[in-house]
Image (cartoon, rainbow, N blue to C red):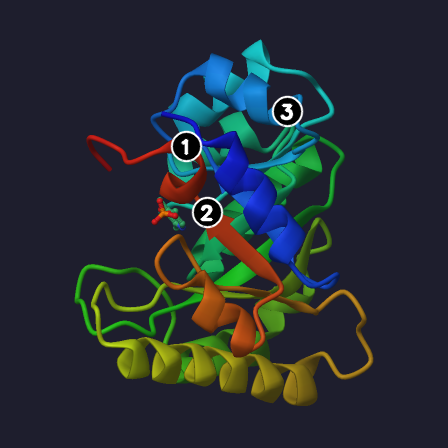
Amino acid sequence: MINVQNYRKIKESLPFHVKLVAVSKTKPIEDILALYHEGQRLFGENKAQELIAKYEALPQDIKWHFIGHLQSNKIKYIAPFVSLIHSIDSLKLLQEVNKQAMKNDRIIPCLLQFHIALEETKFGFSIEECEAMLADPALQELKNIVLVGVMGMATFTDDEELIRGEFIRLKKYFDQLKSNHFLHNPDFKEISMGMTDDYAIAMEEGSTLIRIGSAIFGTRINS
Ligand SMILES: *Cc1c(COP(=O)(O)O)cnc(C)c1O
């Protein structure tokens, strides 16, 4: 069940430089509308199909973030409206986003997703892979995307020091990329880290975008 009190509490606790992405995956339109009426405009989804259905059913001033693993063949469906893609982890994916953005006469903001957790299943760059991509001349040809920062998910664990260490690492990657590639580029400024169970730690370690689902919308049955 949606918990508006919790939403208000979280919102009030955020420093000015941290934005809240309300992660509405698997949750119904009515719950999203309830939060919309609280003033929330930033929502995150992790499946293209579901995102499109919700985009079509809900008010047009909602900003939709795509936070899940992105399949190349789905990009064309979200390119007309998505306001930030959190999950870029290859040049190939970025090239496809660029192509679809161009068709829609848009520039789509993207985050570079890093693999910082212990689990094998989580997607994302290593710092070496990412540096290699940023050095690739092919990247300079992409005029319809803009890289605005980094994203990562910590290990699913109760070990707070492990989680903190992973967030510190992501912040270090951000700083390294900023100084190597984006020093005079004010667009590159976002660090998307922190979910329901670890957002407090993430904010202490420099998060600018927290992605919260279950603390606001209640626990999910699946995904
Ligand atoms: C589901 C999801 C979240 C939100 O998770 P909660 O623990 O419910 O807050 C955040 N980020 C990503 C990438 C997700 O898939």
User: Residue at 59% of width from left, 33% of height from top?
Assistant: 79
Q: Where does label 2 land, which residue? A: 212
Please say if 111 is above or below 40. below
Please say if 191 is above or below 136. above
Q: Do labels 1 and 3 touch, CB within 8 Å?
A: no
Q: Where does label 3 land, which residue? A: 36
Q: Measure how far apart labels 2 and 1 are at the Cα level.
A: 9 Å
| SS at circle 2 | strand
Q: Measure how far apart labels 1 and 3 are at the Cα level.
A: 13 Å
Q: What crowding class fits label 1: few (fewer than 14 Cα within 10 Å), some (14-19), or many (20 or more)?
A: many
| SS at circle 3 | helix
Q: Quadrant of residue 194?
A: bottom left
User: Residue at 49% of width from left, 41% of height from top?
Assistant: 6
State whether label 1 is within 8 Å of ligand 1.
Answer: yes
State whether label 2 is within 8 Å of ligand 1.
Answer: yes
Q: Nearer the viewer, residue 93 or 49?
A: 49
The disc at residue 78 is: none
Query: Percent x, y for residue 2?
Result: 43, 27
| SS at circle 1 | helix
Q: Measure how far apart labels 3 and 2 are at the Cα level.
A: 15 Å
Pick whichever of labels 1 and 3 is earlier in the sequence.
Answer: 3
Residue type indicated by callout 1? Phe
Residue type indicated by callout 3? Tyr
- Total marks shown come to 3
Q: Where does label 1 land, which residue? A: 217
